[in-house]
Amino acid sequence: MTPRTDISAAFESALKWWDDAGVDTPDIMMPAKPKLRREAAQLPAAQKPSKTSIASPPANMDTQAIAQSAPTLHALREAITNFGAGDLSANATQSVFCRGNAKADIMVIGEAPGAEEDRAGKPFVGQSGQLLDKIFASIGLGENDIYITNVINYRPLGSRKPSSEEIALFRPFITRHVQLAAPKFIVLVGGVSLEAMTGQKGIMKLRGQWQDIDLGDGQTIPALPVYHPAFLLRRPELKADMWRDMLSLKARMES
Ligand code: URA
């Protein structure tokens, strides 16, 4: 018979793999993830995720009004930093807003900061960020040619997948962020980004298929969903799909 520890390890590995890919595992499965439980068990009691950390944004929080009242990127950054996102902001070191060139034609939208991004205060600076940089470099794009951010601006405790409620809470902020940056093209990195910006789930099916993102202010921006680099680190054989997607982006930029 297979020992229980092997089953737990296999389950943990499968969940992490699905998460990285943006596969739509029900939120109810997330609190049971062994990794989260193990990380949480090592935390002091005051930092342990409470029951509300998964899906309980602060009551009556009108993020739409806060986001829309920001006239500049600087003001939006301040608004997000001062915004109390409940357990999400309480458990994070700091908010994580952007890196790269805010005037670039391409805006890259990821999921949420991980541990290294939480420490540095910048998105995609860890292992998956390094791969992301190499992916863009493969079509000749450096940090000055892209503007990088995330849907969620605070690291979810244990780097768990953000819940649909948290994605909905932050959607007005990322929508305003896109309105203010006004890129020509968007790259949606992973399933959370796809869901936040298009309302659609299923990154495995939709990667490589251009979408039109309606910002609700008359602007529509073409967006390309791609795999998350953390997923590619586990499935390097799928890098060919990413290469095809980068060629598609390059062709669109040159047309
Ligand atoms: N994964 C993301 O989606 N964003 C980051 O900033 C880091 C890892």
Image (cartoon, rainbow, N blue to C red):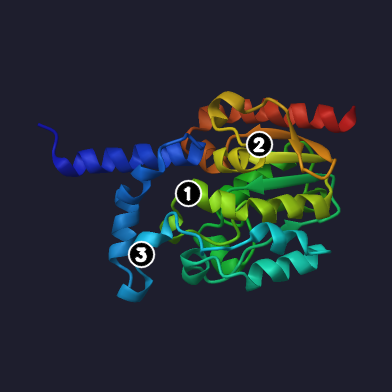
Structural distance between the alpha carbons of marks 2 and 1 = 16 Å
- Which element carries disc 1, helix, strand or loop? loop
- Mark 3 close to ligand 1, CB under 8 Å: no
The N terminus: image quadrant: top left
The three-letter amino acid code for the residue at tag 3 is Ser
- In the displayed structure image, the side of residue 240 where residue 219 appears, left or right: right
Task: Say the numbered circle drawn on residue 50.
Answer: 3
The three-letter amino acid code for the residue at tag 2 is Thr
Structural distance between the alpha carbons of marks 1 and 3 = 14 Å
Q: Residues within 10 Å of mark 1 (few under 14, many from 20)?
A: some
- Which element carries disc 2, helix, strand or loop? helix
Looking at the image, do the residues carrying marks 3 and 2 touch, with CB atoms under 8 Å apart?
Answer: no
Residue assigned mark 2: 198
Q: Looking at the picture, how far across and down is residue 231, in whole percent?
A: 51, 38
| Location of residue 54 (image quadrant) | bottom left
Residue at x 64% of width, y 31% of height: 242
Whether residue 45 is situated above or below residue 225 in the rendered picture: below
Residue assigned mark 1: 163
Front-lying residue, 228 or 139: 228
Residue at x 37% of width, y 64% of height: 49
Q: Looking at the picture, how far across and down is residue 12, in whole percent?
A: 32, 43
- Which element carries disc 3, helix, strand or loop? loop
Residue at x 74% of width, y 64% of height: 76
- In the displayed structure image, the side of residue 145 where residue 155 appears, left or right: left
Mark 3 or mark 2, which has the lower sequence index?
3
